[in-house]
Image (tube, rainbow, N blue to C red):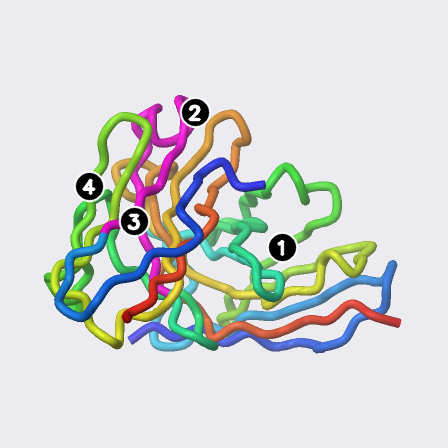
Amino acid sequence: QLQLQESGPGLVKPSETLSLTCTVSGGSISTSSYYWAWIRQPPGKGLEWIGSIYYSGSTYYNPSLKSRVTTSLDTSKSQFSLKLNFVTAADTAVYYCARYGAGRSWYDGWFDPWGQGTLVIVSS
Amino acid sequence: QSVLTQPPSVSGAPGQRVTISCTGSSSNIGAGYDVHWYQQLPGTAPRLLIYANNNRPSGVPDRFSGSKSGTSASLAFTGLQAEDEADYYCQSYDSSLNAYVFGTGTKVTVL
């Protein structure tokens, strides 16, 4: 059974870089069948897709965050990572990693499974 | 601001039938992109409940069902149970935003 686990600092200072890693177990990260995604949820609010990365290294980002986001993949460690630059209090959220699989097309896919999430607070 | 609108809350008595709407537009649901639904129990991560409009992953009870028509989709509970108290989100793709989008979320309360 595939499992995902987020890790990283729980507190980041404003204007600095948020860095998180997702470790995948129970399956291969080097598969052409899926993308690997980051999604966030501010406290008490809804879900926002941040970006996705393919096993080849191809990336796809939410245009609203694209200028500040970088994702990467380390297949040797079965991990993928997120970096979000120049954070502000508005970036305070629970950050989830998830696997994204295509449906009828890559636009019709869904996120499953999800990691348990990690809370990142942006504060000085 | 999400482009997929859901009612903030719905409630029902145990055993009652309840539905949640997800209203989009011509650039997402109305463009033909599939809709998926997630259940988020308090303090936990979302889990996939319905995929590709009306399909249940293994392990999801058959009292949950999904449908899609025009620019909207719906999630239905037949026989509401106490353990169904949670937040529910729809998800699709928006071609104007070039992004995967989630609904505003609906809190289900069992009376």
- Residue type beneath disc 2: Ser
- Residue type beneath disc 1: Thr
- Residue type beneath disc 4: Ser
- Residue type beneath disc 3: Ile
Q: Quadrant of residue A112?
A: bottom left
* Stretch in magenta: B19-39
Question: Secondary structure beneath disc 2?
Answer: loop
Counting from the top left corner in percent of width and height, residue A119 is at 63, 73
Instruction: Residue at 34%, 76% (x, y): give it.
Output: A26
Determine contact: label 4, label 2, CB under 8 Å: no
As drawn, is B53 to the left or to the right of A69? left
Which residue matches tag 1? A71
Which residue matches tag 3? B20
Q: Nearer the viewer, mark 1 or mark 3?
A: 3
Estimate the spatial distance between the alpha carbons at disc 1 and disc 3, rounded to whole Å: 34 Å
Question: Secondary structure beneath disc 1?
Answer: strand
